[in-house]
Image (cartoon, rainbow, N blue to C red):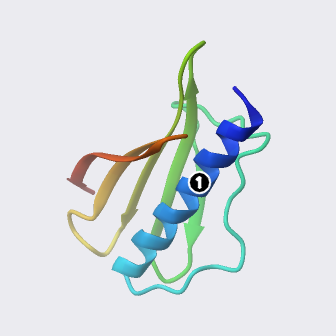
Amino acid sequence: MLESELKEIEEGFHILIQSRLSEFQVPLPRELPHLEGLRATKKKPAWFDVDGMYGGFSYYLLSSKTHVKLIVESWSRIVGGSGRRHFITPTGIELVEAGFV
């Protein structure tokens, strides 16, 4: 994976966080998560907790020889059906599942 690809995925992740937080009318935290050095896996994803959201973002990188993507699940425990799963690649953000949690 190229450093530029990781940077583009991280930028997409930050855009997704901003979008989801605006849905819940929650202010953006001062610091957003960085992907450099991320060692999270599907079995043990990283977690970005957001005050006021009563939930947050679970995420991990999935890569092969030719593709890399960030798998992100986000939800609020107090808003039924708020769960969303997105794939983020260097070329964009794709919603792949909605309505869980």
The three-letter code of the residue at mark 1 reads: Trp
Q: Does residue 20 appear left or right of residue 97 in this picture?
A: right
Q: Does any portion of residue 54 appear in the rendered image?
A: no
Which residue position is annotated with label 1?
A: 47
Residue at 53% from the left image edge and 86% from the top image edge: 27
Query: Residue 56: horizontal and vertical position, in percent?
Result: 49, 64
Depicted 7 relative to depicted 40: above or below: below
* Quadrant assignment, res 68: top right
Which of the two residues, 53 or 1, is positioned nearer the viewer here?
1
Q: Does any portion of residue 30 appear in the rendered image?
A: yes
* Quadrant assignment, res 64: top right
Depicted 11 relative to depicted 3: above or below: below
Query: Residue 10: horizontal and vertical position, in percent?
Result: 63, 51
Q: Does residue 17 appear left or right of residue 97 in this picture?
A: right
Query: Residue 11: horizontal and vertical position, in percent?
Result: 61, 56
Which of the two residues, 96 or 43, is positioned nearer the viewer here?
96
Q: Quadrant of the N terminus?
A: top right
Depicted 66 relative to depicted 68: above or below: above
Q: Count the marks: how many?
A: 1
